[in-house]
Image (cartoon, rainbow, N blue to C red):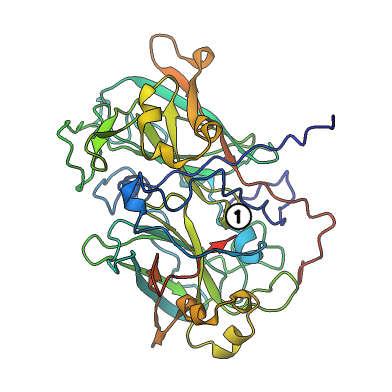
């Protein structure tokens, strides 16, 4: 477990979640949500110790290739097939402060749009050198980066002819269990973003645009890999200066 | 005009999808060799303090069918009621207990299982003790934003009766959806996404 020694431990409760910014549970255009969405009102509560605390992960748990999907499943001397890209950015909170020590896990289809999964039935080929998972932990400035190939779009059984735009799944830990978040990153300029029933679960266009990574020409590595910049925002914490003191705190 | 507050918006959630296991439990999904072990697969070791328990159950959809592609994470205090987190300022938690676990539901039966210890009591915001509980976070294909709930223990009737969170549930008939019955050292906590037995989910 990591100690961010230059920062006081944070104990404030999180800002309440703007549930109109997130997709609602029931989104009939995404059919699987119909039987999997709670129908009763949620029980709202201000964070207790159980929500304010959360697991943190140390950089020592990471392997050398964990943030390199081009090589972390490849045979020695070989690499995954596809458009080489760097995905990088910062994890911030709603107060625009960097979140250091945030564990990011990501997974994606290969360049042809095929996942390495037993339930996957798309006829596109597997790449023997591509597993599709990776992870990293943000540095003191909340910064992260990883290398991969650009995933392909793929069809999925929902409507008769629904396709997912190219995307990378992200799982993010902050410092509190209530910050736990899973989302997806899309790519600038992809016209398929706006046709996707899963993207359309998000009601606000500006919220969708928050998930579209920009082509970052400045950080492109010549003759090697293009860069996409993707910042992620987790819930912010209240300042605890004037909060009632909690037991033993 | 006033000064802008300058707050950012939280990144909107998207479903974990059907292939969440590739990213979060790759060894479980058959992708070996990338990580030594799946994160969160082990919460305890031989030195962990406290009573060993197992927590098992399923996640059921609106027809009562168990989800075979869900992923569950739990977060709990150690046996003395302390969290293994930098934000825990009341003391040092058991270094042999992570407090955090992750488990995919079984692809055939839909069952999940955590080997852990019974958590101690943790104070509510006003200092009153909450009953022992485990926080749950559930994601799956078809779940657009991860679901939060808590499991309480069926053999803690007195503590449950004075728990400040359980007391907030207006419809008392729903309280049992959060209470896992004990069978020896095994507690069964089935999570119902919809229907008459819909689990109480939290906006935390």
Q: Position of residue B96 (x, y in %)?
A: 52, 67
Side (left or right) of B136 relative to B169 = left
- Can residue A65 be seen? no
Q: Residues within 10 Å of mark 1 (few under 14, many from 20)?
A: many
| A16 over A111 or under it: above or below | below
Q: Position of residue B185 (x, y in %)?
A: 40, 84
| B164 over A5 or under it: above or below | below
Side (left or right) of A101 relative to A106 = right
Task: Please name the residue shown 44% across and 69% down the image.
Answer: B45
Give the camera-side residue of A138 and B202: B202
Task: Please name the residue shown 41% across and 37% down the image.
Answer: A199
| A126 over A176 or under it: above or below | above
Task: Please name the residue shown 50% across and 13% down the image.
Answer: A217
- Can residue A218 be seen? yes
Residue extending farthest to the top is A223
Q: Classify the position of the C terminus of chain A by image quarter.
A: bottom right
Residue at disc 1, secondary structure:
loop
User: Where is mark 1, residue-wise?
Assistant: A176
**In terms of image quadrants, where is residue B95?**
bottom right
Residue extending farthest to the left is A123
Q: Position of residue A218 (x, y in %)?
A: 53, 13
| A36 over B171 or under it: above or below | above
Q: Chain of mark 1?
A: A
Side (left or right) of B75 relative to A193 = right
Q: Position of residue B92 (x, y in %)?
A: 65, 66
Residue extending farthest to the bottom is B158
The image shows a total of numbered marks equal to 1
Q: Classify the position of the N terminus of chain A by image quarter.
A: bottom right
**In terms of image quadrants, where is residue B119?**
bottom right
């Amino acid at each position: 477990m990591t100690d961010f020694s230059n920062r006081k431990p944070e104990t404030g409760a999180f800002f309440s979640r703007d549930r109109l910014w997130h997709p609602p549970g029931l989104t009939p255009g995404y059919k699987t949500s119909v039987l999997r969405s709670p129908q009763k009102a949620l029980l709202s509560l201000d964070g207790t110790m159980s929500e304010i605390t959360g697991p943190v992960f140390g950089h020592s748990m990471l392997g050398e290739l964990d943030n390199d999907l081009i090589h972390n499943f490849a045979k020695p001397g070989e690499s995954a097939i596809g458009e080489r890209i760097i995905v990088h950015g910062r994890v911030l909170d709603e107060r625009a402060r960097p979140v250091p020590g945030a564990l990011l896990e990501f997974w994606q289809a290969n360049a042809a749009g095929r996942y390495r999964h037993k339930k996957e039935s798309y006829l596109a080929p597997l790449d023997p050198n591509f597993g599709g998972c990776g992870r990293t932990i943000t540095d003191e400035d909340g910064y992260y980066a990883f290398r991969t190939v650009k995933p392909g779009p793929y069809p999925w059984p929902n409507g008769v002819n629904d396709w997912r735009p190219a995307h990378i799944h992200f799982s993010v830990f902050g410092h509190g269990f209530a910050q736990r978040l899973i989302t997806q990153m899309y790519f600038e300029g992809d016209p398929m973003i706006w046709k996707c029933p899963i993207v359309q679960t998000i009601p606000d266009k500006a919220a969708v645009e928050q998930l579209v990574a920009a082509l970052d020409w400045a950080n492109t590595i010549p003759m090697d890999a293009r860069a996409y910049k993707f910042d992620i925002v987790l819930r912010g914490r209240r300042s605890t200066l004037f909060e009632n003191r909690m037991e033993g705190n | 005009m006033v000064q802008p507050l300058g707050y950012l918006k939280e990144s909107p959630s998207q479903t974990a999808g059907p292939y969440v296991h590739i990213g979060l439990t790759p060894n479980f999904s058959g992708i070996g060799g990338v990580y030594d072990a799946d994160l969160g697969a082990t919460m305890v070791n031989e030195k962990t303090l406290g009573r060993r328990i197992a927590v098992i159950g399923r996640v059921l959809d609106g027809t009562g069918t168990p989800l075979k592609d869900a992923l569950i994470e739990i977060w709990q205090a150690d046996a003395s009621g302390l969290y293994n987190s930098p934000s825990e300022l009341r003391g040092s938690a058991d270094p042999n207990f992570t407090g955090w676990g992750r488990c995919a539901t079984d692809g055939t039966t839909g069952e999940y299982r955590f080997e852990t210890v019974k958590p101690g009591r943790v104070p509510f915001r006003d200092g009153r003790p909450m009953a022992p509980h485990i926080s749950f976070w559930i994601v799956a294909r078809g779940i657009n934003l991860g679901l939060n709930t808590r499991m309480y223990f069926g053999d803690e009737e007195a503590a449950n009766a004075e728990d400040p969170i359980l007391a907030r549930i207006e419809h008392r008939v729903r309280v049992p959806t959060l209470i896992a019955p004990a069978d020896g050292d095994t507690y069964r906590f089935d999570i119902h996404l919809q229907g008459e037995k819909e689990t109480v989910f939290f906006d935390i």
